[in-house]
Amino acid sequence: MIPRLLLATLAVAGILLPAGLPPGAPAAAQEAREPLPLPPGPAMPKARPGADMPAARGDDAATAGAAGADGRDLGGETGGDLGHDPGGAADGTSPVRAQLRSYRFTTLAAGIPARIDSFAFLEGQRVAEGETVIAFDCSTERAERRAAAARADAARAAMRADAALVRRGGAGQVKADLSRAEYAAAVAELEGLDTMLEKCSIAAPFDALITAKAAQQSQFVNAGEPVVELVDTGALEVDMVVPSPWLAWLAPGHAFSIAVDETGDRLDGRVDRLGGTVDPVSQTVRVIGRLASHPPGLLPGMSGLLRFARADTAGAAAADDGGKAK
């Protein structure tokens, strides 16, 4: 008979695990018969309601499709992308952001390298069409013009004298031709200086608002350097980007209304033209509209929410306008 102490030692070492021990076996041997506990593993995540559920089949799938057809989940709340129409409302009732911009603006640049002699206007001031905005110091060019005028007068006198000698036979025709050519060169030089003197001042090409000054009085600028920006605030149009599926009903002449955020005015207008291309990534197209009226205080850059008239309403309005025109 194996001694009980040896059995206990073998059982603890894992070498011998007897099916049963006689009563009175050591406690160590009794504990060796119990299974060892497993080490704790990672906690299993709790399943969220409705997450990773198998796809519905049969009647359940039909029920799920009916519940999500209008963009709402089964709980009745609006879902993230369920039922989302990238083109917005098909009839254009969804508002879009639009901004006012001027379709007539320009940047005036120096035509000659010179010092600015007069630049009295400030940003935000208005100038009338034909009014001088900038005057340059052209004292040197004016002196050159006077010298060129004197040379032209001398060449003209020499040409006339040579022509008289040719008539009397005192000079050859070649001399008369050379005198005529010298006079033509002097006249061309004079015309070039006159053209340069025309660039000694810059006039406003239209009634405009000065929006930016890139130079100041007494500053020297080079030819072609921008000096001032002008914007015609009386010629505003509405610029917007709309979903390209709206092209199915949106066309020039379609009516709209815009609520300007900055002034609170609600203005009516019509689509003037459509953009030439559609952005294939965002599926949008640019639309330009004209306002029916221009209340005072409107400035380029103002924006607001724009709503198009319903397609049927716009068509009826266009028909009424056509009837009135007849």
Image: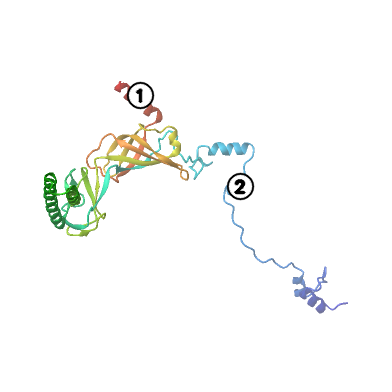
Give amino acid for label 2: Met
Q: Nearer the viewer, residue 95 or 233?
A: 233
Q: Name the residue under label 2.
A: 53
How many other residues sit within 10 Å of disc 2, few (<14), some (14-19) or many (≥20)? few
The location of residue 307, given as percent across then percent down, is 36, 36
Q: Is residue 292 positioned above or below 170 on the image?
A: above
Q: Residue furthest front?
A: 169
The secondary structure type at the circle numbered 1 is helix
The location of residue 39, given as percent across then percent down, is 67, 66
Name the residue rendered at 33%, 23% in the picture.
322
Name the residue rendered at 34%, 35% in the picture.
272
Q: Nearer the viewer, residue 176 or 24?
A: 176
Q: Is residue 74 positioned above or below 144 on the image?
A: above
Q: Which of 321 and 196 is in front in this view?
A: 196
Q: Nearer the viewer, mark 1 or mark 2?
A: 1
The secondary structure type at the circle numbered 2 is loop
Residue 319 - label: 1
What's the coloring here?
Answer: rainbow
The location of residue 21, given as percent across then percent down, is 82, 71
